[in-house]
Image (cartoon, grey):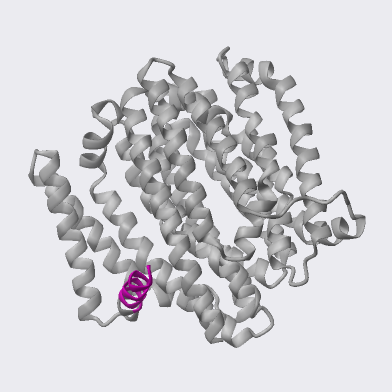
Amino acid sequence: MSSLKQKTATGLKWSSIERFSSQGISFVIGIIIARILSPSDYGIIGMILIFTEVSGVFINGGFRAALIRKQNRTDSDLSTVFYYNIAVSLFFYFVLFVSAPYIANFYDSPVLAMVIRVVSLNMVIGALGAIQGTILNIAIDFKTQTKITVITLIITGTIGISMAYNGYGVWALVFQGLASTVVSTVLLWSFIGWKPKLVFSLNSFKELFGFGSKLMLSGLLDTAYRNIYQVVIGKKFTSAELGFFTRAKGLAQLPSSNITNIIQRVTFPVLSEMQDNVIPLGNNYRKLLKMSAFVIFPLMMLLFGLAEPLVKILLTDKWLPAVPMLQVLCFGYMFYPIHAINLNLLQVKGRSDLFLCLEIIKKVLITIVLFATAPFGVLVMCYGIIVTSVLALIINTYFTGRLINVGFLKQIKDIFPIMILSFITGFLAYLPSMILTESYFQLVLGGILGAVFFIGLSYLFKLSELNELINFLFKQNKEL
């Protein structure tokens, strides 16, 4: 167990470094480009995300999770999935290439046809390095992944900023993304020694697909519905409004999705090693939930409170219509880590059937809420995301309760004190915006008030997560 704990700590350290360094660099690059480009440029990219991401789900096919979970994976397994990825990516590139003019007509945006045909190349190029990326995850080798990510971002960020500055508009975003896929794939092949063998095993395919196919269908549903708001907004409203929504969504997901990704990438392979020991699995699972909430909840509420001065300073006044959407979405996405970790447990336990069942139920609810709110505008649609988030939390935790006896009430009880402190933190961070007029003062004073309150009361109430986080950070810093 000690080696498992050490593996988790090391993985978390390098996963955190990789994620925060990549997101830090990416955030700075994104801010520079957003200050140059218009909301409409981002709206155009938002229109096509659903098509490329849905295709990506078919390419992955749930095989990444199946390979990570399988304890006795072979080189034949890896090669089989590699060739599957290539074949399916080529198929979907052809489909999107042919469909591009029809998609452009649907949105009444002629430029989309060529944009789709270029952006879709990412699928084929990315498929070439998918197995190497999976190998890094299996080995919990995020140190190597950090090197690859940082090098990629520096090169492609330079390309994106240069093109934006020289007036290429939406094509700056297109070629920045394409360059990112090319550079990262080349680096993965350079850093990882694995090469595919000339073998395609039907037995391997059937075994991995048996588990992964349900995750693929679940991922297909999740991806389609995660992007369905962009489709409806892009069709019903202007590209500028879609740009505001896309930027608000991106900022709201920045803390929650990235920190959750760090935790998931490390804990899935680690928890998979204790999948048959229910009591240790349940105990570690609850600790993971509380630590995730302790980190993400206050960050989301700080973002809520500081949204207006943050957008003004970083993105300029042209992006201010995104502020109300961002504030609402902070509440909608703050439970994202709880959803993700609950679903992660189903994969650890091998219950991809329940995973699929959950996704179907939740997507029906999302459809109902989406079409009920769409006639009232984009902001009301954002409020609908809060509703679906709460409903999804209740549904996800029901099945977790059945598997390891950690259901909705236990999970809410575990995170309730953190939730209350976080809500008050958000209010205190927002308070200076109600009194002061200078954006920089609003941002600095609000941030200090919120952070000091949350950390101070966490210390006063002796929340164990504060000590665990401090100990983890200090220990890992000494080892760097």
The answer to which of 401 and 274 lies nearer the viewer is 274
**Residue 393 visible here:** no
x%, y% of residue 176? 49, 30
Question: Does residue 308 appear left or right of residue 1 in this picture?
Answer: left
Is residue 262 placed above or below 115 in the rendered structure? below
Residue 136, image x and y in percent? 61, 59
Establish if 14 lies above or below 94: below
The majority secondary structure of the magenta stretch comes to: helix
Give coordinates of residue 455: x percent, y percent: 22, 70
Residue at 84%, 58% (x, y): give it. Answer: 76
Can you say which quadrant of the picture contains the C terminus? bottom left
Q: In the rendered structure, which segment of residues is drawn in magenta?
A: 468-480
Specify the quadrant of the image occupied by residue 205: bottom right
Tell me the quarter of the image containing the N terminus. Answer: bottom right
Above or below: residue 288 compared with residue 375: below
Q: Is residue 340 left or right of residue 58?
A: left
Give me the residue at 29% from left, 50% from top.
303
